Image (tube, rainbow, N blue to C red):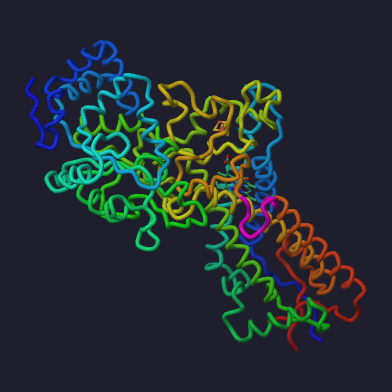
Amino acid sequence: MGHLYEKYVWEIPVRATHWVNVLSIAVLTLTGIYIGSPATLGATPSDFVMGWVRFVHFTAAYLFAVSVASRIYWAFRGNRYASWREFFPILTPAGRRNMLATFRYYTFLCKKGPQPVGHNALAGTTYALVFVLYLVMIVTGFTLYAEHAPQGTMHKLTGWLLVLFSNQTLRLTHHCVMWLLIGFAIHHVYSAWLMDVKERGGVMSSMFSGYKAVRTKD
Amino acid sequence: MARKQGSDTEAADGLEFQDSVSTLLERRGVTRREFMKFCTAMSAALALPPAFAPRIARALDEVKRPTLVWLEFQSCTGDTEALLRASNPTVAEIVLDILSIDYAETIMAAAGHLAEANLDKVVKEEKGSYIAVVEGSIPMKEDGIYCCIAGRTALDRAREVCGGAFATLAVGTCASYGGIPAAAPNPTGAVGVKVAVPSATVVNLPGCPLNADNLTATVVHFLLFKKLPATDGLGRPLFAYGKRIHDNCERRPHFDAGQYVEAWGDQAHRHGHCLYKMGCKGPETFHNCPTQRYNDKTSWPVAAGHGCAGCSQPMFWDSMTPLYKRLPNVPGFGIEATADKIGLGLAVGTAAAFGVHGVLSAFRRGDDSEGAKED
Ligand code: HEM
Ligand code: SF4
């Protein structure tokens, strides 16, 4: 068995965007839930409770959008573990084999799953889907946001969506995808914990430090 | 004054219009002052500087009568009603009288073949210069047999009349986007004019009913500038549909403050707080209701204490119902399931599934590894 060493896996942009996403999604979810079903928290008409909540939502939204865009850029610039290829194992026969093996491991059909250095094949695929959900949130969010300034640049850029879909459909999508992301967050924290325990590679701390415990080949 | 008389189609009622609009108004007991007030209001509705009022007055005085035909298809006649019930006799009504209304099912005296012959004549003799107004949606299914007038389908008539018009004004949501007849399951395949006759020049004036002021203002714009007003991506004039109701609403300070009506007749409702939680569709709807209001600026739904129904948006009904809930129902789930109930179920379900997985994993032996292998 090869000896253990610390391998630098997650580069700074990967970790930074990861934690910015965590923070902004948490803020966006909390403020979004208030926007969706607000309680009467204003005592007088000169209060600005909903005003501030929406301000925070939109500020976090810009932060989130920049973070997602940066991560997509890094998928073409970063190391192999940050690469877009990690998210599409389905494109290669080896990747598809790994997906099946990981699936069998998760469903207790076999004892050992593949132990890749980067993302496991199912996780990578899930993240690709999650990024699609991120983009859905950003596109629906900015389209709805742009309606406050009709004929503005943002409204002109997003106007085609409002011809294809009604703004209520976009709003419902924006609302429901939040719940999908909440579902993902639960699954994500659980899987990270499980792999941290079972894989013993320090997956949890690697998202802070960038290093994972990896064995040499022989 | 030198008014050029239009074609012979208006021979019968032509006499009255030999006088200028101001003489006409005088005869009806409308003072010059009231007329100027109307012109100022129109310049405001069109978002023009007040200095335009005298120009509007002059343009209306000098105008040559354009011919107008009013087609009515799958509609409730609400838009005709909105126009006719304008308090009498308003200046607006008289301005619309400037138009030679050669065909309008609800109000014309002629009937049967005579009426249809009038319409045919306009289409033939004034090709490209008359205005068509359409009220109601056009059914497309089964070749349009669900709406026939004088033995011809609405689709057939619309293609001919709107296709040959200088412009078509689609009044009301049904004519603009299909409206209520187009609500799911849309048994007649109802659509708006622009979809039925893509080649026509269409200005949409949606609303349920349309605000007669916006129709008058569109006509005034046309008479003043000899062209149609600028429109948005959905074909609606920007002067009337360029702002969102929610952004012009008199209850908006309560929205921003966080003061919401929770039940009809509660304290907040009596204080005039925001109707967001009662399903108000103001945040979804572009219309000048808060400023223009209905029935001679008397009121509009939100002022009266009822949320906006979103009646002037495309896909009205399907996308704006349930009227008293903010979000539509999630397709494929029961009527009572809201997005939040389904979402919460999903979150709890996920947590439970992974909880079970976690317990099973904790008791499982021999599935550990010693870290990832170098690759
Ligand atoms: C993960 C990210 C996000 C989550 C979880 C989230 C969540 C939510 C939720 C739950 C609502 C309430 C929807 C409703 O019931 O009407 C909402 C509203 C909204 N969100 Fe987001 N959102 C996210 C990202 C964004 C982004 C990137 C933007 C872009 C500007 C955005 C803009 C908006 C707008 C404009 C509204 C409607 C606000 C209003 O009508 O006043 N959101 N969001
Ligand atoms: S009443 Fe309706 S339109 Fe007015 S502020 Fe509230 S949500 Fe917006």
Q: In the picture, which quadrant includes the C terminus of chain A? A: bottom right
The x and y percentages for residue A61 are: 58, 47
State whether residue B307 is above or below residue B187.
above
- B345 left or right, relative to B329: right
Q: Residue at x 45, y 40 (%)?
A: B312
- A189 left or right, relative to B269: right
Q: Residue at x 13, y 37 (%)?
A: B9
The x and y percentages for residue B282 are: 53, 36
Stretch in magenta:
B329-338
The x and y percentages for residue B263 are: 70, 31
Q: In the picture, which quadrant includes the N terminus of chain A? A: bottom right
**Which is nearer the eye, A124 or B181?**
B181
Q: Quadrant of residue A182?
A: bottom right
Q: Quadrant of residue A68?
A: bottom right
- Residue B330 magenta: yes
Seen as rendered, the residue at the extreme front is B112
- Residue B213 magenta: no
**Which is nearer the eye, A15 or A134?**
A134
**Which is nearer the eye, B371 or B184?**
B184
Main secondary-structure element of the magenta-colored stretch = loop
**Ligand 2 location (quadrant):** top right
Q: Residue at x 74, y 78 (%)?
A: A103
- B249 left or right, relative to A198: left
Q: Residue at x 51, y 41 (%)?
A: B284
